[in-house]
Amino acid sequence: MTAWPGAVNGRGPALSAASAVLLDMDGTLVRSEHVHRQTWWRFLDSWGVTVSEDEYERHYVGRRARDVLEEIPGPWTGTDTSAALLAMDELADELRDAVTVVPGAPELVRALRRRGRPVAVVTSAARDWARHVLDVVLGVADEVSVLVTAEDVALGKPAPEGYLLACSRLGLEPAGCAGVEDSPSGVRALVGAAVGTVVGITTTSSAADLHAAGARWTVPDLLAQRWAPAGDP
């Protein structure tokens, strides 16, 4: 882990120093990449398509399925993919019990809110999935000030639209906010939105890939000691 500037005993200053904290959901608050990976694998198999691990990491992870299908050429190009996208959502919903909590995630959200720092969740997932994760899996739905999902934006990550929308709804400038993401596409979205503090969490991608995308710091989880001196989130 790279220490934050002004670190005390190897730990950085409180995230509560930011005007607000912008959090990705899948891979950042919960470990769910295996669910999305299985969903993509079934979809690709149904089209007779095989992709390498490198291709998957570069083009699929952390992104809306709609954006991927519009950008990546395949047998689906030029076809109506609405039924396929619906099937993918249904499959992911079937697998939702396989999602687990990233250590420290719910505690971090609650601690930030106790200190008067609003939390926004900006996800490439659909709203129903996001509500299930925040409410049932994490139990923090009432602590989240703003939720931006796939349905709320014209362009998903790595486009910055979702984070810009979250800041607009919060009434805050991105430069004063902090953001945490697990994928290079998500980090690029934070950078593109000019979010002041960009942190990568290495649950899905390597620290090197997250730094290359623009993260200044990386952490392995969301436990309190990653962020602040004792007594702060």
Image: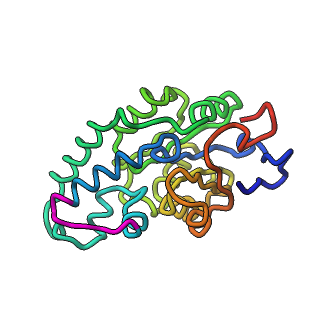
| Left or right of 43, for residue 186 | right
Residue positioned 44% across, 59% down in the render: 157
Indicate yes or no whether the magenta region holds residue 46.
yes
Q: Say which of 160 and 198 sits in front.
A: 198
| Left or right of 179, for residue 161 | left
Q: Main secondary structure of the magenta part?
A: loop
Residue positioned 29% across, 58% down in the render: 66
| Left or right of 185, for residue 59 | left
Q: How is the image coloured?
A: rainbow
Query: Relative to residue 223, is residue 43 depicted above or below?
Result: below
Name of the residue lying farthest toward the bottom: 73
Residue positioned 67% across, 30% down in the render: 111
Query: Relative to residue 50, is residue 16 depicted above or below?
Result: above
Query: Relative to residue 18, is residue 2 depicted above or below?
Result: below
In the picture, the quarter occupied by the N terminus is: bottom right
| Left or right of 185, for residue 211 | right
Residue 178 spot, x, y in % from top left: 65, 50
In the picture, the quarter occupied by the C terminus is: top right
Residue 58, quarter of picture? bottom left
Magenta stretch, residue numbers: 45-53
Residue 71 spot, x, y in % from top left: 31, 70
Residue 202 spot, x, y in % from top left: 57, 53
Residue 70 spot, x, y in % from top left: 27, 67
Indicate yes or no whether the magenta region holds residue 176.
no
Residue positioned 57% across, 43% down in the render: 170
Q: Give the number of callouts.
A: 0
